[in-house]
Image (cartoon, rainbow, N blue to C red):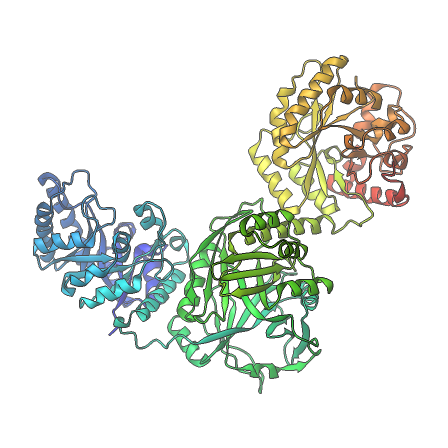
């Protein structure tokens, strides 16, 4: 007869009432009551017992007594008083067993005789209340840390109300379980079950934070349970896990997961006598993967599939579902409205797998508390039983291909041998809360083997991954999660997922698919240099892999070739993989981070070019154009209007203007970086390092560091200093400070300063002789200073990194005050004034970004900074498009 299953309240989140309700809903027979739950409950002890009974739960054990034994007489007297008061309460609840952990007290001594004597006295006290003591060897106990040692003490004490508590975590953390077989079953009073990974970590720390559901760690729980049951033990089996995720999750979900893990564990131990659980179904290949799409994402996915060689071979007779097929790989595109799918998104909503007995599989699912989904179908349509996975994915169980009769014929499949032969695996991403639950579902409900959890050093933080696979290795699902909350600055790709198709020739597949226009993901050359270092591949093979953006891994069993598409819709992409020999992995620890970084780069490129044309330059939104916008607001305005960059003003130039202290305000820095990452906008430059006679370049170090943190490329500087030698020297110093940070220093020459024109700027640069020095041509300053376009054409191209673009009224102000006022408040859009915009830009090197610095105080007051930024880029594009050949033809 199967043992009764109980759960420790310490496993679950919530109040005691929440925990009891969850335990009962998951069909546990009883609970192990944690001391902290008793103390925190508003119910009286008698009420707790009544509430448990009302829910059909026995209170099998209580755990909170510690540091009892092997202590001085005075301390032991205090311990007995504490125990007596506790026993008074437990007697009212109806507790049967009290767990006492081996001492960790600093007062304790290493004396087994004293420990046995004092435990005998404690057991005497407990027996008088109808209780019994289960002595537990804690793996970190001060003197008693093994079950064998605890058994010696219990045997020496010789009291009928004193026995052992065997906890799989404590036992297997120290040794294996074979030694337990010598213990009489009637002296085992309580058994606790938990799994864990074998990692280099303090045992107490692992116990408090990383005790896992059975089957999710590396401990031999099947062997442990078999050893315990071989003694004749017939008491309850208690789940006692302790994981930070479980203890924050919905207690009902955690309890159900716990029950699944316990039933699966019993099933794995023949002596546990599980007879009412239908066996796990025999599963085969993935028959189809279904994607929920809409009018936006559907055509994108369809185009990607067609380029990979798939054809739309069928359309469902009664539902808006397309069947795409190539070889043995099938993908369904479901256009029905999905409330849980964001607009424009494609999401894996269902998998179909071969099953030898779908009906028995659904009975097993129901016994394991997994929802069996109702399915609306018309007469004559196939009846496909389906089960809901924890993330909402429907798992269809298919005996044969009869379901294909539900589809009207579409296009014929491509002639000739198929490039893709089937579906190798599907990769899903879960939240950390659902990661273990998903693994338990596939292990317990479908009988899949759960692989070890690996951790990937991904670009935006660690990713945990584990594979679930049928015993014959025909059906594979990989599950990924971010174990910690991803920083807000990281790109918002929510729960990426992909379908990996199998091929017999990855190289031929990549070549053919690329020729057909498939959006294959480019892989950087650095990856192949590293690949060569790791595997010493033949030169021709390495060149072929590089040419076709194919990734490669190899182990003692075989090799793995794989390549990817770019991200299709916001979270879904495809892969094509070839397994050679008995290779059973998914690319090793290098491939995934490389793929993630490549997807990130492609995403940024798509954002940059989503509104720009190939003939237009990259535009940057200079902060002075909309200085009323804070840096995060400026970034959003740039993204909405179609800029690629922003320039950020980190220093206050005038007392009246707004100041955004990014260099000294961590909150503002963080928010700005979040918006940069979320939008794909980059920082082109920071300003302003204004160095006069009394300024020290070293005062700008934090300013430069902030620019580097923001990812800026250039620093704008001005030199209002009449002493040429001094300003040249200080400019050189600033360049030297900026160079290790990857920044250029670009000298701007406003006509009202002591460095008033192009010739003066050139003289400084030649004198400084710094490789990261540059000149910033601001069209207003260039025109107002009377600088020569002919002179500009003669200067080294490497001196120029970007330009400030604007226009201004034809009339040149005659006073410095008026020059400054125009520059800061009354510039014009390109083409509205008298500056030779095309002529100046044509004298600059080609390909420079154009930073639009066009402050217009009156217009901004009327329309706001964000709309002004949009009007500026619209006008600039229109004006430059009238003579595109003139730009950058020096």
Q: Quadrant of residue 311?
A: bottom right
| Left or right: 375 as drawn, with respect to 672 | left
Q: How far across and how far down the image is residue 747, in percent?
A: 75, 25
- The one nearer the camera, 353 or 636, is 353
Residue drawn at x 30%, y 46% is 204
Residue drawn at x 69%, y 34% is 713
Q: Quadrant of residue 885?
A: top right
Q: How far across and how far down the image is residue 29, in percent?
A: 27, 67
Which residue is most to the bottom?
380
Would you place residue 437 above or below residue 203 in this image? below
Q: How far across and how far down the image is residue 662, in percent?
A: 61, 31
- Asked if residue 30 can be seen in this view, the reply is no
Would you place residue 6 above or below residue 637 in this image? below
Would you place residue 616 above or below residue 165 in this image? above
| Left or right: 171 as drawn, with respect to 878 | left
Q: How far across and how far down the image is residue 820, in percent?
A: 81, 23
Would you place residue 666 above or below residue 583 in this image? above
- The one nearer the camera, 681 or 224, is 224
């Amino acid at each position: 007869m199967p043992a009764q299953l109980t759960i420790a309240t310490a496993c679950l989140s919530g109040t005691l009432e929440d925990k009891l309700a969850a335990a009962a809903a998951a069909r546990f027979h009883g609970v192990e009551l944690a001391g902290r739950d008793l103390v925190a409950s508003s119910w009286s002890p008698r009420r707790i017992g009544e509430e448990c009974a009302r829910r059909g739960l026995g209170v099998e054990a209580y755990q909170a007594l510690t540091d009892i034994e092997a202590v001085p007489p005075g301390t032991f007297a205090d311990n007995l008083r504490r125990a007596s008061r506790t026993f008074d309460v437990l007697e009212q609840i109806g507790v049967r067993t009290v767990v006492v952990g081996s001492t960790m007290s600093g007062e304790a001594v290493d004396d087994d005789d004293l420990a046995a004597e004092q435990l005998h006295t404690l057991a005497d006290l407990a027996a008088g209340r109808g209780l019994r003591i289960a002595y537990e060897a804690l793996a970190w106990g001060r003197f008693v840390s093994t079950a064998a040692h605890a058994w010696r003490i219990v045997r020496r004490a010789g009291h009928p109300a004193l026995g052992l508590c065997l906890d799989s975590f404590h036992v297997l953390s120290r040794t294996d379980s074979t030694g337990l077989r010598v213990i009489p079953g009637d002296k085992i009073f309580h058994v606790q079950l938990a799994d864990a990974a074998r990692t280099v970590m303090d045992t107490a720390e692992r116990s408090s934070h990383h005790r896992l559901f059975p089957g999710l760690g590396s401990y031999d729980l099947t062997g442990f349970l078999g050893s315990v049951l071989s003694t004749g033990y017939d008491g309850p089996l208690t789940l006692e896990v302790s994981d930070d995720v479980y203890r924050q999750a919905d207690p009902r979900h955690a309890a159900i997961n716990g029950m699944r893990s316990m039933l699966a564990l019993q099933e794995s131990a023949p002596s546990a006598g599980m007879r009412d659980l239908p066996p796990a179904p025999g599963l085969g290949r993935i028959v189809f993967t279904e994607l929920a799409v809409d009018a936006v994402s559907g055509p994108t996915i369809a185009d990607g599939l067609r380029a990979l060689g798939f054809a739309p071979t069928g359309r469902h007779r009664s539902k808006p579902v397309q069947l795409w097929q190539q070889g043995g790989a099938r993908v369904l595109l479901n256009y029905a409205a999905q409330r849980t799918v964001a607009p424009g998104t494609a999401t894996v909503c269902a998998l179909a797998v071969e099953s030898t007995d779908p009906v028995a599989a659904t009975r097993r699912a129901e016994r394991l508390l997994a929802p069996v989904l109702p399915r609306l179908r018309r007469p004559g349509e196939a009846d496909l039983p389906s089960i809901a996975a924890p993330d909402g994915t429907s798992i269809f169980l298919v005996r044969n291909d009869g379901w294909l009769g539900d589809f009207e014929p579409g296009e014929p499949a491509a002639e000739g041998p198929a490039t893709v032969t089937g579906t190798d695996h599907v990769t899903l991403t879960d939240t950390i809360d659902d990661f273990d639950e998903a693994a338990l579902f596939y292990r317990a409900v479908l009988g899949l083997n759960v692989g070890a959890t690996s951790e990937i050093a991904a670009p935006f933080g660690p990713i945990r991954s584990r594979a679930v696979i049928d015993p014959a290795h025909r059906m594979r699902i990989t599950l990924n999660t971010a174990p910690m909350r991803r920083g807000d600055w990281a790109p918002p790709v929510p729960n990426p997922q992909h379908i990996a198709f199998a091929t017999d020739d990855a190289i031929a597949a990549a070549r053919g698919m690329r020729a057909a226009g498939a959006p294959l993901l480019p892989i950087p050359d650095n990856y192949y240099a590293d690949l060569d270092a790791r595997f010493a591949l033949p030169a021709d093979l390495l060149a072929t892999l590089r040419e076709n953006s194919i990734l490669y891994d190899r182990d003692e069993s075989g090799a793995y070739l794989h390549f990817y598409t770019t991200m299709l819709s916001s979270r879904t992409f495809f892969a094509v993989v070839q397994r050679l020999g008995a290779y059973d992995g998914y690319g090793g620890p290098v491939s995934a981070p490389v793929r993630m970084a490549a997807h990130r780069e492609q995403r940024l490129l798509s954002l940059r070019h989503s509104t720009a044309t190939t003939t237009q330059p990259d535009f940057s939104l200079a902060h002075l154009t909309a200085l009323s916008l804070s840096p995060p607001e400026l970034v959003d305005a740039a993204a909405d209007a179609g800029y690629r960059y922003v320039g950020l003003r980190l220093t206050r130039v005038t007392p009246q203007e707004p100041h955004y202290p990014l260099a000294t305000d961590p909150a503002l820095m963080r928010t700005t970086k979040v918006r940069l990452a979320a939008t794909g906008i980059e920082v082109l430059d920071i300003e302003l390092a204004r160095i006069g006679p009394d300024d020290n370049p070293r005062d700008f170090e934090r300013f430069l560091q902030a620019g580097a943190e923001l990812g800026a490329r250039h620093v704008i500087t001005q030199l209002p200093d009449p002493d040429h030698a001094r300003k040249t020297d200080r400019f050189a110093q600033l360049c030297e400070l900026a160079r290790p940070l990857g920044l250029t220093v670009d000298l701007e020459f406003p006509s009202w300063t002591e460095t008033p024109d192009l010739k003066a700027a050139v003289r400084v640069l030649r004198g400084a002789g710094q490789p990261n020095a540059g000149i910033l041509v601001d069209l207003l300053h260039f025109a107002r200073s009377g600088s020569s376009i002919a002179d500009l054409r003669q200067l080294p191209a490497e001196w120029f990194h970007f330009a400030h673009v604007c226009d201004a009224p034809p009339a040149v102000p005659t006073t410095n005050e008026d020059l400054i006022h125009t520059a800061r408040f009354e510039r014009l859009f390109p083409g509205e004034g008298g500056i030779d915009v095309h002529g100046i830009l044509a004298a600059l090197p080609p390909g420079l970004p154009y930073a639009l610095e066009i402050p217009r105080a009156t217009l901004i007051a009327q329309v706001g900074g964000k709309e002004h930024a949009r009007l500026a880029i619209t006008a600039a594009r229109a004006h430059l498009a009238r003579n595109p050949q003139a730009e950058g033809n020096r």
